[in-house]
Image (spheres, rainbow, N blue to C red):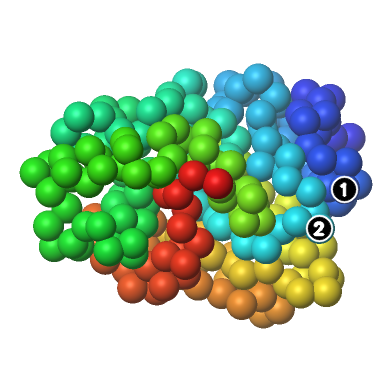
Amino acid sequence: MIPQPILTALDRVDASWRPHLVKGLEAMMQADPHYLPALAADHYLPTDNRLFAAFALPLNQVRYVLVGEGPYPRVESATGVCFMDGAVGELWCDDGLSKAVNRATSLRNFMKMLLVADGKLQADNCGGPAMAPVAAAARSDGSIQTLAALQHNLTAHGFLLLNAALVFRPHVAPAIDARAWQPFLQTVLQVLSAQPQPPTLILWGKIAEQLKKLPETAAFPQSCAEHPYNLSFIRHEGMQKLFGPLQLLRAR
């Protein structure tokens, strides 16, 4: 049986997802009967029943499925939502991105990629001196000011923000946890592939790209990139083309 602590975390998901996520957990139990019981008895991130927090977005509103590697490895940062660092409040400071954003490397590089896509920053000149005037303008030109606003913009565009591994444990390699969660994500992809218009699947990093081996992914338009913790992500033209028109840094 699925351990009760795992089932309890489903209380935070939208009702449209619950039966499908139960089916995904059952698929995990069938693939490896020991994984979820061991996980339920272990310490992992995210805490506070946020394991399935990404599924607060109703199923019929999903337009994009963004898959990262795994939760941030800090209690205050891991929210159950891909690369949304719970320790980040304000996005900007006087001389650029806030200290909290700069600590969250993936988020920092994602924001810089958005700024490059908006024409506000040059990919080959995006360090501190170049960021200062950008930040000054952002604080007065109608740009969003907080991470919560960025997450709101993403969900408003229909982004399901997942990770290949839904948990982080310091004593388990992310790739191992990601393999254990594949049957769950395979079930999620099956459900989404049956929608009238399958969403765009966005895979960041080598662990997320393992999902391309699943037959269900053939039904989706796809876009792949290196993980955003790589500086090269900032200049990724495919990501700029995908995200640029969405104007995610503009207040809605």
Q: Which residue is mark 2?
A: 60
Q: Point out the frontmost of discs 2 and 1.
A: 2
Q: Which residue is mark 1?
A: 16
Q: Nearer the viewer, residue 250 or 90?
A: 250
Which residue type carries mark 2?
Asn
Percent of width and height locating residue 9: 76, 29
Which residue type carries mark 1?
Ser
Which quadrant is home to the N terminus? top right
Helix, strand or loop at label 1? It is loop
Callout 2: few (<14), some (14-19), or many (20+) C-alpha neighbours within 10 Å? Answer: few
Q: Is residue 218 left or right of residue 12?
A: left
Mark 2 or mark 1: whose residue is earlier in sequence: 1
Percent of width and height locating residue 43: 58, 21
Percent of width and height locating residue 127: 13, 47
- Is there CB contact under 8 Å for labels 2 and 1? yes
Asked whether residue 11 appears in the rendered view, the answer is yes
Q: Quadrant of residue 55?
A: top right
Is 188 situated above or below 98? below
Q: Quadrant of residue 114?
A: bottom left
Q: Is residue 228 left or right of residue 153?
A: left
Q: State the residue at coordinates (36%, 34%).
A: 91
Percent of width and height locating residue 192: 77, 64
Spatial CA distance of label 2 from label 1 is: 8 Å
Q: Nearer the viewer, residue 205 or 95?
A: 95
Q: Quadrant of residue 239?
A: bottom left
Check the image and name the residue furthest to the left: 129
Q: State the residue at coordinates (22%, 57%).
A: 121
Q: State the residue at coordinates (64%, 50%).
A: 156
Callout 1: few (<14), some (14-19), or many (20+) C-alpha neighbours within 10 Å? Answer: some
Q: State the residue at coordinates (67%, 63%).
A: 63
